[in-house]
Image: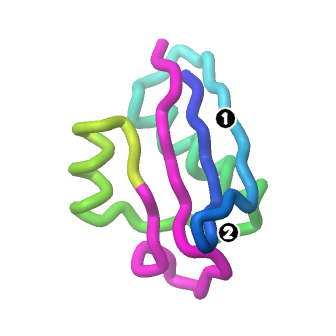
């Protein structure tokens, strides 16, 4: 599985990374692991999965985490989280 994580501010890409996970694990574990690794790389607290995020991710394999998903203040508009390749 490959997941593309991007930080955006004013419709400009600030940072991005692709997280690969080829472990023999569930899709959910791979998704949570990718989010955690991206947050460590970007020095962010992990965002909360709100109902809106869960629904978007289930339907489109993509969601955006806005400031209301983070406990700490963020210095960007949103974190885009997208599956680009499934196992």
Look at the image and give the residue range highlighted in magenta.
64-87
**C-alpha span from label 2 to label 1:** 16 Å
The residue that mark 1 highlights is: 19
Residue 40 position within the rendered picture, expressed as x and y whole percent measured from the top left: 73, 57
N-terminal label among 2 and 1: 1
The quadrant where residue 33 appears: top right
Query: Which element carries disc 1, helix, strand or loop?
Result: strand
Q: Residue at x 61, y 47 (%)?
A: 5
For the residue pair 55 and 36, the one nearer the viewer reads as: 55
Residue 59 is drawn in which quadrant?
Answer: top left
Q: How is the image coloured?
A: rainbow
In this picture, is 84 found above or below 47? above
Q: Secondary structure at mark 2?
A: loop
Location of the N terminus by quadrant is top right
Q: Please state which of residues 62 and 37 is positioned toward the viewer in this rendering.
A: 62
Residue visible at 42% across and 73% down in the picture: 69
Residue at 62% across, 25% down: 21
- Spot occupied by residue 66 in the image (x, y as percentages of width and height): 45, 71
In the image: residue 53, left or right of residue 7? left
Q: Residue furthest bottom?
A: 73
Q: Residues within 10 Å of mark 2 (few under 14, many from 20)?
A: some
Residue 44 image label: 2
Is 16 situated above or below 71?
A: above
Examine the structure image and report whether residue 73 is included in the region drawn in magenta.
yes
Compare residues 13 and 31 and report the one nearer the observer: 13
Query: x%, y% of residue 39?
Result: 66, 58
């Amino acid at each position: 599985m490959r997941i593309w994580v991007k930080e955006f501010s004013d419709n400009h890409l600030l940072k991005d990374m692709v997280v690969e996970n080829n472990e023999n694990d569930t899709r959910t574990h791979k998704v949570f692991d990718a989010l955690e690794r991206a947050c460590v790389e970007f020095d962010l607290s992990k965002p909360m999965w709100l109902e809106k995020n869960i629904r978007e991710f289930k339907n489109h394999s993509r969601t955006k985490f806005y400031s209301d998903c983070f406990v700490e203040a963020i210095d960007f508009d949103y974190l885009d989280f997208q599956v680009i390749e499934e196992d």
